[in-house]
Image (tube, helix red, strand yellow):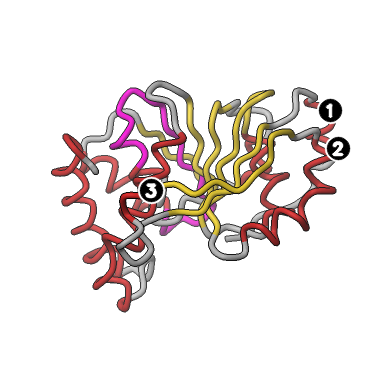
Amino acid sequence: MFGAALPVALAYADLLVGPGVERGLIGPAETERIWPRHLLNCAVVAELVPQSCRLADLGSGAGLPGLVLAMMRPQAQVILVEPMARRTSFLLECVSSLGLGNVEVRRGRAEEYAGQIEADIVTARAVAELRRLAVLAAGLARPGGVVLAMKGQSAEQELIGARPVLDRLGATEAKVVEVGGEAVGLEGGAATVVRFRVGTSRAARRRHGGSSLNK
């Protein structure tokens, strides 16, 4: 699945189960399933990401899915947005160690960068409920950009609950997408993603951009 990016993925896995666990970014219990539940689960989302684009990963944490997508899409410009210092320090170390020249790390909350990043694709994993996440992600996207929110079994229910917010934002094409069919046999390998296209009205996004992300 990783193809030419496999050596980088292997090195990243070592960082996650080593310094990532030591610093509390990854739970010790996750080390045994770092590949199916985390790396493969993020890698399959590359199916929805163009080869060349500007991508913002919201609340990047330990770099999932942002760093994985950066290695899968080396022609993409990837911006990791993360408010916590210890996490941004880890991300910067990963970017340097893995030689990912297409990645930029920005420390701060999503609303601080609203209207500045203008990404073609905005990704998020385990950040917030969709009705709250939609507002934050829309602020990082360009008009007409696409948001990919990685969700689990709650995806359909969250999408239903977020419909009023998506409507106010002028979002379109909102639906639940299953990716990674080839990884279905692996625990957590496949991914469930809520995908929607951001509206073209910046004013609407600003009006509904008062939510905060404290992660």
Looking at the picture, tell me which residue is in the foreground, 13 or 199.
199
Q: Please state which of the two labelled residues, at mark 3 or mark 2, is closer to the viewer.
A: 3
Residue 195 position in % (x across, y down): 60, 41
Circle 1: residue type: Ala
Residue highlighted by disc 1: 203
Closer to the chain start, of discs 3 and 2, is 3
- Estimate the x, y position of residue 176 in percent, counting from the top left: 60, 48
Look at label 2 and name its amino acid.
Arg
Taking 77 as reference, is 97 left or right? left
Residue shown at 22%/57% (left/top)?
Answer: 13
Q: Nearer the viewer, residue 112 or 173?
A: 173
SS for dot 2 = helix
| Contact? badges 2 and 1 (CB < 8 Å) | yes
SS label for mark 1: helix
* Residue 72 lies within the magenta run: yes
Q: Residue at x 36, y 49 (%)?
A: 91
Label drawn at residue 5: none
Pointer 1 or 3: first along the chain: 3
User: Where the N terminus falls, by quadrant?
Assistant: top left
In depth, the one of 81 and 194 nearer the eye is 194
Work out how far the residue at label 1 is from the one at label 3, CA to CA, in angstroms.
36 Å
Report the residue marked by disc 2. Answer: 207
Stretch of the chain drawn in magenta: 69-87
x%, y% of residue 23? 33, 68
Q: Is residue 8 above or below residue 55?
A: below
Q: Name the residue beneath numbered marker 3.
A: 180
Residue 16 pos. (x, y %):
27, 60
